[in-house]
Structure formats: structure tokens, C-alpha cells
Amino acid sequence: MATFGTLSDRLTETFRNLRTKGKLTPADVDGTVREIRRALLDADVALVVVKDFTAKVRERALGDEVNKALNPAQQVVQIVNEELVAILGGEQRRLRFAKTAPTVIMLAGLQGSGKTTFAGKLAKQLEKDGHTPLLVAADLQRPNAVNQLQVVAQQAGAAIYAPEPGNGVGNPVKVAKAGVEYARQKQHDVVIIDTAGRLGVDAELMKQASDIRKATDPDEVLFVIDAMIGQDAVGTAKAFQDGVDFTGVVLSKLDGDARGGAALSVASVTGRPIIFASTGEGLDDLEAFHPDRMASRILDLGDILTLIEQAQQAFDEEEARKVAEKLATEQFTLEDFLEQLQQMKKMGSMKKMLGMLPGMGQMKQQLENFDDKEIDRTEAIIRSMTPGERRNPKILNGSRRLRIARGSGMTVTDVNQLVQRFDQAAKMMKTVARGGVPSIPGMGSLGGKPGASAKRGAKQKKASGSRSGNPAKRAAENAGIAAAPASAPTGSGFGLGGGAGAGPQPSEADLAQIQKLFGKG
């Protein structure tokens, strides 16, 4: 969510200064409100919205709810969070479907705002939810608009109705009306009408959009607005509200690097809810808009709920169960690790997912340096291995590692590091699966004092030798101890060299605990 990055940084810094104060004076509150006002204005939030927002924050911050709070700074953050939720629309609003199919959804907005791309994203999301959407190409003005919608529809796997070639040819009102009738005949339960836009608001654009609305009587009219448009967003939204009277807002290009605060003003100024937010160029980069979650992201409080929802959609419950069992029985191999990487990729960008964690705004530089392609490189190394090498990396000698490095386009050092990290993770998971506390490299065991486990091991090793005073007898007894088989062979972590039945079998509680880590809760 790069669009609100600057605003988030400014607000976070303002609240950081508050945390050093045990009690807030009116001067402290005024200073905080002044900084919030500057941050919002710098982010292009409309002046009328800023005035109303800061007045409410100041009134509540000087009230009894802060004076009686144990932690005044946290209480002010809570107040700002609640007021941000209010200007973003308050509660989430979902699409409204018609009682009798088809549901007609009309898209409106300026040229370049992302209407056509959003049409494909919405169609793909509706198909996932079990609907049968139909895209109607009613933008007959912009060059190649019909062709673009056809390409987007093909990528989304959605049906399209495009009887006219466009490029100035055809009547968009007739096409839209015929598209709804076509959907009714072909039993499509949702119709998405892509209308024409202009570089600016004009009478011709509004009349055409208004005529399409009258002809099709849509259940939803979604106004698609570029989150990076600046202060002009408010004026454009008002013009469309007066001319077409939309029912909901779609924020596009929320992944951009502009200030984007004008998007915060749209819901407050127009009184219409924001329903969707487009967070990338891919057809899967579309989120239902949650005002409370967006406010939490802006204040660097994280968005754990969205992260959990994405994980639940990407991870298969049955596969997670199998992985949990393999972890507990030490049979987890690089083949299983490869499958987990592929499921993680379905969730989208790792950088975006990490950005949803609370406090990650303070690690902005580390997030920027994070390379999403690292997963692809790891996948390439594992795919360059033979099935036998994936199941047992112990057989990877120098020549095999050189072959894998050449096959994946990486270096031998990269291959060595992957195997080493996997082996360390295997040991940690084996400990967790048995109900123990893992030992993190460089930190020792987490369950006791640093170095305690090493001292115990040294004592046990010393005690295990022979204490005979006869040198010959002591040597013979020590040799016998070394040759004796282990009483409970455990193999190595994740099945690397261990038998399938090595080690104790996991209990149901162990499996349930591991499943919480890797699957649905």
C-alpha cells in the first residue's frame, strides 16, 4: 500500500513523540492535532475533510476519555483510528445483487482510471464466488477499448458481449441494453458494463453515462477513481455524482507511490461507500475494501485479518494436514518444501504480505530491499534436483551441487546455503513436533539459560565414558560404548537419512498444533 506510505510515516512519527509523555496537556494535544493536519494536507486530503477530522480528534482528545486513560498516547491513537474509519465509510459495504438475475453493474469514471482492468478483476472474483459474469463492451470511443476488454476477458476466463468494433463506431446505449438482454438469454447472472471515459469531465460524457443508466437500470453504478489523481479527485467525484449518481466507489492504483490522500476524501465528501480497492496490475490484485483495516494499515497497526483470509484461500486444508503429519514424523522433504513455496506464491507478493504485519512501517527499508524473486530462485534450485536428491539431500556431493547450480542458473554457494537452511529448519521443526523448544542458531535453547543445554550435553558425554582405573580395561569399555547401537534411532530432521518410522509417533495434539502453523486454524 505504497500510496499512503508518506501519510503513514508522518502519523506514526507524530504518535511516537506522544508515547514519551505520561500525561497530555492541552498544548500537547494542540501540537499533535497540528501535525496530523499538516500530514493530511500534504497527502492531498480535501481541506473540508481535514477541518472536520481534526476538530473531532481535538474535541475527543481533550475530553474525559483521554484524561482518565492509563495510557493517554495509546488512547489518542485509538481516537485517530476511529475517526479515520469514519471518513473511510465506517463499515464495509458489499455488492448488492438483484433478487432476479441478471445483476447489472455499470462502471463509470475518467479515461485511464482503470475501468477496463477492474472489469476483468471483478469478473474473475465473481467467477471464484460461483457467479457467471458477462462483460459488455460499451466503451466505443477510446481507440482499441473493445480489443482491450476482449483480451482482459480472455485472461479472466469470462464471457464477453462485443457486437461493435468500437473506435468511434456504434451506439453505446444500444450495446449496453442489448448486452443485458443477451445475458438474460444465455443465463449469465451478472452483467458488467464497461462505459467510455474522457480525459476530463464534460457534458457529452455525462449524458452518455446517464443514458446508459436509464436504458439498463443497473443495480450498482461503480465510480472507478485513480488513487493518485490528487485534489481533483473530489471535484471529479462530485461531478459524476451529480451527473450519474453512482452507488459505490472503486479505488484503483493503490500500489502507486503518489500521496493518494485525496482517496480518503471521496467517501466522506460524496457519502458513497468505497467497495473495492485495486492493489496491483494482476487480475488477482483486487480486495474488498474494509475501512477499519485500511485505517489500521495507515496507522501502521497491521492488517492481520486480510493476511489470514489470503492464507486460507491459498492453502489447501488436506494438504496442510499431510504436511503437518510429515513434519511430526520427520518425513518432510525438499519436494514437500517446493509444494509449500508454490502455495505461498498463490497468496501474492511476499512484500505485500509482510507489509500487513503490525509495525512493519518501521522496517520500510528492509521491506524495500526484500526481493520477491528469491522464492523463484529457491524453486529453480529444487527443480534442478533429481527426485532422489530432493528426498535425501545427504547424497549431494560436489559434482551434483555443481550440476544443480548450472541447471538453475545459480552458484554452488546458493545451493549450499539452501541445503544448510533446510537442514537447520528441519532440526527446529523436529524439536517443535516433539513438544520441545527449538534452539535458534546463535541464541541457544529458548527454554532455559543460554549455554545450559551445551553444559548438560558436555556433562552427559563425560559421564557416559568408562571410569575404570585400568587403562586397558577403560579403553575396551569405551570402545564397546562407541560400537553399541543407539537405543532409539531418530534419523535426521525431515526424513534426511531417517526411516519412515524413526522416532516417536506424534499425538493428535501435536498434529493439531502444527496444523495451526501451516494450515487453516
Image (cartoon, rainbow, N blue to C red):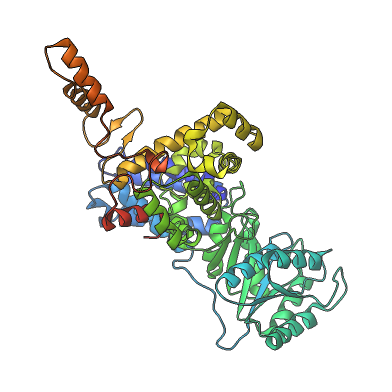
Which is nearer the eye, 338 or 348? 338
Tag count? 0
Q: Is residue 69 visible?
A: yes
476 above or below 518? Answer: above
In the picture, measured across the screen, residue 24 lies left or right of residue 317, that is left
Horizontal and vertical percent position of residue 20: 30, 37
Residue that extends furthest to the left in the rendered view of this protein: 469
Horizontal and vertical percent position of residue 440: 34, 34
Which is nearer the eye, 405 or 142? 405
335 above or below 105? Answer: above
The residue at the point 50 percent across, 36 percent down is: 366
Which is nearer the eye, 19 or 252? 252
270 above or below 353? Answer: below
Q: Quadrant of residue 86?
A: bottom left
Which is nearer the eye, 241 or 31? 241
The quadrant of the image that shows the C terminus is bottom left
In the picture, measured across the screen, residue 385 lies left or right of residue 519, that is right
Q: Quadrant of residue 451?
A: top left
Horizontal and vertical percent position of residue 15: 38, 43
Horizontal and vertical percent position of residue 78: 35, 54
Q: Quadrant of residue 438?
A: top left
Q: Is residue 54 visible?
A: no
